[in-house]
Image (cartoon, grey):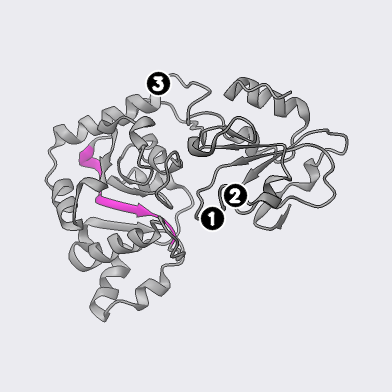
Amino acid sequence: MMKKHGMTFRLKKFPQSTDHLIFVARAKYHMPSGINVPAYLWNVESPITVRFPAIKKDEERYSEIFTYSKRFTDNKKYFYAPIPFQYDKAFPYCPDPARKTVLVSQIAGLHKYGQKNELYFLRQKSTEWYVRNHPEDYFLYGKDWKDFKKTLSPKEQEAFDRVYHGYIPRKSDAVIKAKFILAYENGIFDGYVSEKIFDVMAYGAVPVYIGAPDIKNYVPENCFIDKNKFQTEEALYNYLKNMSDEQYYDYLICGSEYMSRPVHYNDPLTVFHLLEKEIFAPREIFYRFFQRIYHLFLK
């Protein structure tokens, strides 16, 4: 494998005789040089990490671009394709709240972009509040939090050491221990609904969500807690801390039923690994993907 321009190219899968190529955009739009066949781009990242819409020189490289953003869909160059995911575990799944060992957890790396509509700052702000006020009720997982620790007082650093549990390879191991998970998107963009909220419901916790303003078009509002409804971290904390078991079960059941419903190929819960495993895909794989999942027939 080789990484270039932020994208992963599986060179051993490069089809020498293909006449169509698919690229999954996770960092930049650049494609390798020497590509002389029609290429199609699928954008699955927010504008925080991948500029969108593409600038003209990048746009011209692709025959068609598929995106989660209905705002830019024109059915000429840009076509709608929601971000899909696949979960291998069986549903429904409602764990016993009494077995939960922590009230709130967050699983996120510390990033600093400073761009419009980004939410990285909120991940840090929430962590700062819990470290200073209720470290006993908070677990933090993820990379690159050392610089944040340096900004804290000696007493707060001791509290941070108690809440911070480093990088965790399997997100499910952290989710299953917590009653609530802070599921903050990278940014606030219509249609950009990543794996974050689905991961939480999939492994038996309740998401505290902020991100896509149109999230209720994708996930029933009774399945998650909308952080926008709380003006302060303290107000949210009090709501979570004092929630009855009955109300908590209602959230869990809603999430479990949503995740266990029959999967339709044109919604976000589908087989993402088809393109993940085939960055360079022969035409038959390309056509099969769009015919089965998005019902788009490219001529």
Q: Please name the amino acid that badge 2 sits on.
A: Arg
CB under 8 Å between discs 2 and 3: no
Residue 202 figure quarter: top left
Q: Please tell me which of labels 3 and 1 falls first in the chain.
A: 1
Residue 24's x, y, as percent?
A: 64, 43
Say which residue appears at 57% left-offset and 47% top-offset. 53
Residue displayed at 45% across by 54% down: 168
- The verdict on residue 225 being magenta is no
The answer to whether marks 3 and 1 mark residues whose Cβ atoms lie closer than 8 Å is no
Image spot of residue 149 (x, y percent): 35, 73
At 15% from the left edge and 49% from the top edge, which residue is drawn? 241
Give the crowd class for mark 1: few <14, some 14-19, many >=20 residues within 10 Å: some
Residue range in magenta is: 97-109
- Tell me the crowding category of disc 2: few under 14, some 14 to 19, or many 20 or more residues within 10 angstroms, Cα based: some
Q: Quadrant of the C terminus?
A: top right
Tell me whether circle 1 and circle 2 mark residues in contact (CB < 8 Å). yes
Q: Nearer the viewer, residue 77 or 188?
A: 77
The residue carrying mark 3 is: 261
Give the structural element (helix, strand or loop) at label 3: loop
In the displayed orientation, state which residue is furthest to the bottom: 154
Amino acid on which the number 3 mark rests in the picture: Arg
- The residue that label 1 is drawn on is 49
Choose mark 3 or mark 1, whichever is in front: 1
Q: Please say if 243 is above or below 118.
A: above
Q: Secondary structure at mark 1?
A: loop
Tag on residue 26?
2
Q: Residue at x 28, y 66 (%)?
A: 128
